[in-house]
Amino acid sequence: MSTLFDNSIRVIYGNDIAVQAVETENFHPWPDGSIVVKSVWKQEELPDGEIRPGKFINAQFMVKDSQQYRDTEGWGFAKFSGDDLHPTGKNASFAKESCIACHRQLAEKTGYLFDVPMKVNTQRLIQNLEKK
C-alpha cells in the first residue's frame, strides 16, 4: 500500500507473471501477460491521527501484450471510477492521449509503471532480526 502526495491511498495488485517480474527484477521490458491493478481511495484522517482509506476513487488496470498494444509501449490501459465503476475515456485513443503519454514522460525507467515495489531480501531481514 502506498500513500501519495495527492492524499490518496493506493493498493497495487499483480498477477503471477507481474509478481515474478518484480521478484526477479525482470521488468525491462515487463513480460507479456503481466497484469497490474491499482485501487485508489481518498485518504481519510481520523481524529486520533490514524489514516485509512476513505471514499473509493478508481481502479486502474494495465495489461502487457507487446503485439496487441504496440502504440502504447505494449500496455493496454483501463480505468474505472466512482462507486459505479464507470469507464474513463470514450474510446481507444484515451490510452494513447492520456495514459501512455504521461507514463512515457514519468515512468520509462520502470517499464512504464509508476509504482514498482522494491525487491526485498527477506532472508537478510530475518537474519538481521535474529542477531538482535
Image: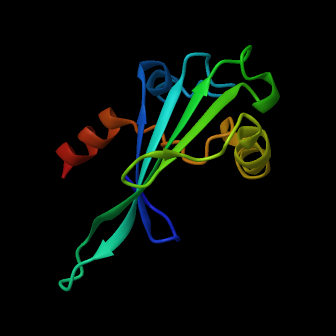
* Image location (x, y in percent) of residue 124: 34, 38
- As displayed, is residue 45 above or below residue 64? below
* Image location (x, y in percent) of residue 64: 62, 23
Q: Residue at x 31, y 33 (%)?
A: 123
Whether residue 28 appears in this view of the structure is: no
Residue 77 lies left or right of residue 71; in this view the side is left
Residue 70 lies left or right of residue 114; in this view the side is right
Quarter holding residue 53: bottom left
Q: Which residue is drawn at 24% across and 81% down?
A: 49
Query: Which residue is at the front of the view, 73 or 111?
Result: 73
Q: Residue at x 32, y 36 (%)?
A: 122
Quarter holding residue 34: top right
- As displayed, is residue 119 above or below residue 30? below
Q: How many marks?
A: 0
Whether residue 117 appears in this view of the structure is: yes
Quarter holding residue 52: bottom left
* Image location (x, y in percent) of residue 20: 46, 21
Q: Which residue is drawn at 49% across and 25% down?
A: 18
- As displayed, is residue 82 above or below residue 75? below
* Image location (x, y in percent) of residue 129: 21, 47
How does the figure colour the protein chain or chains? rainbow
Residue 80 lies left or right of residue 26; in this view the side is left
Query: Which residue is at the front of the view, 93 or 77?
Result: 93
